[in-house]
Image (tube, rainbow, N blue to C red):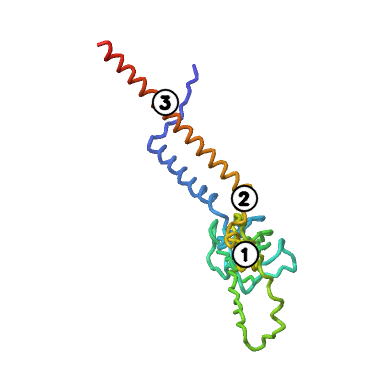
Amino acid sequence: MPQQKTRSPKLPRSVQVLMVLALVLNALPLSAALAAPVSQDSVMVITFPSEGSTVSGQVDILGTATHPNFNSYGLLYATGARVTAQTDWQLTDQIAWDVRTQVVNGQLGTWDTTGLPNGSYVLALVVYGQGNETPQAHFVNNITVLNEETTPTPEPTATPNPEEPGEEGEGEGDAGPPPAAPTVVQPPTSTPRPTATLAAAAPGEGEEGGDDEGGLLPTDLFSVDAIKEAAKTGAQLSLLLYAIGMLYVLAKAAIRYYLRQQAKGDAGS
């Protein structure tokens, strides 16, 4: 006889839906447990500022501070490029101290660098557990503080009053040599033309009946310039008289010609 195949019984659809929901519900706590931080681990880290950063003014320090038996955390700073056994932490001027709240990827504190000298600094994040006096620490090296330096305002200086002459304590020998007089250059002046001078009469000439008027004539009456000027004036007068004579002759000839023509006309008529 042929062997018959047996089929597995098919589950109802409602049962299948319930099984899928159960699997989903079981998977949710598992994924949540994987996403949440493990409570048994202590995490302390500063994410900003990181090593080699340059900061100024008010600096927000970011990071994480957790502990399974968390009590508190604090933030410290010190001068220097790296943390050593001789690092002098500012215990009286902490950035934050005895903070009783855990921080995960948040702001741990604010570091005010405005009053600090520019230079290299280091940071420390310390986390205390319950009943434990020794903290766990995380360090950040080589942080440069570089604030803009303000230029000091210069103070006004007192201007000494000049001493007036005659005050006490002023010696006659302290005045020093008098200043040299400035040299004044006179502007060039035009050369004056020679003026006629009157010759003084010889003594005794008036008494002896001599020519008293001879001494009143200008000395330069017969100078070369006077002769040239007289010749020029005479030439101009001669030309003028010659021109007048020529005009007279021409006018006379024109009148005669006109009269002749008039007489010829009368005779022909």
* Quadrant where the image shows the C terminus: top left
117 lies above or below 171: above
Residue 154 seen from this side: yes
**Earlier-in-chain disc, 3 versus 2:** 2
Q: How many marks?
A: 3
Residue 195, image x, y percentages: 59, 57
> Marks 3 and 2, how far apart in space?
40 Å
Q: Look at the numbered disc 3 and give the secondary structure of its residue.
A: helix
66 with respect to 119 (left or right) = left
The residue singled out by tag 3 in the image is 250
> Marks 1 and 2, how far apart in space?
19 Å
24 lies above or below 77: above
- Residue type at mark 3 is Leu
- The reply to whether dot 1 and dot 2 touch (C-beta < 8 Å) is no
| Structural crowding at the residue carrying mark 1, measured as other residues with C-alpha within 10 Å and reported as few (<14), some (14–19) or many (≥20) | some
At 62% from the left and 53% from the top, the residue drawn is 220
Q: Residue furthest left?
A: 269
At 62% from the left and 74% from the top, the residue drawn is 92
- Residue type at mark 2 is Phe
**Earlier-in-chain disc, 1 versus 3:** 1
At 40% from the left and 38% from the top, the residue drawn is 17
Residue 132, image x, y percentages: 63, 70
**Earlier-in-chain disc, 1 versus 2:** 1
The residue singled out by tag 2 in the image is 222
The residue singled out by tag 1 in the image is 201
Q: Residue furthest bottom?
A: 168
- Residue type at mark 1 is Ala
269 with respect to 49 (left or right) = left
- Numbered badge on residue 211: none
Q: Nearer the viewer, residue 236 or 134?
A: 236
Q: Residue furthest right?
A: 85
Q: Look at the numbered disc 2 and give the secondary structure of its residue.
A: loop
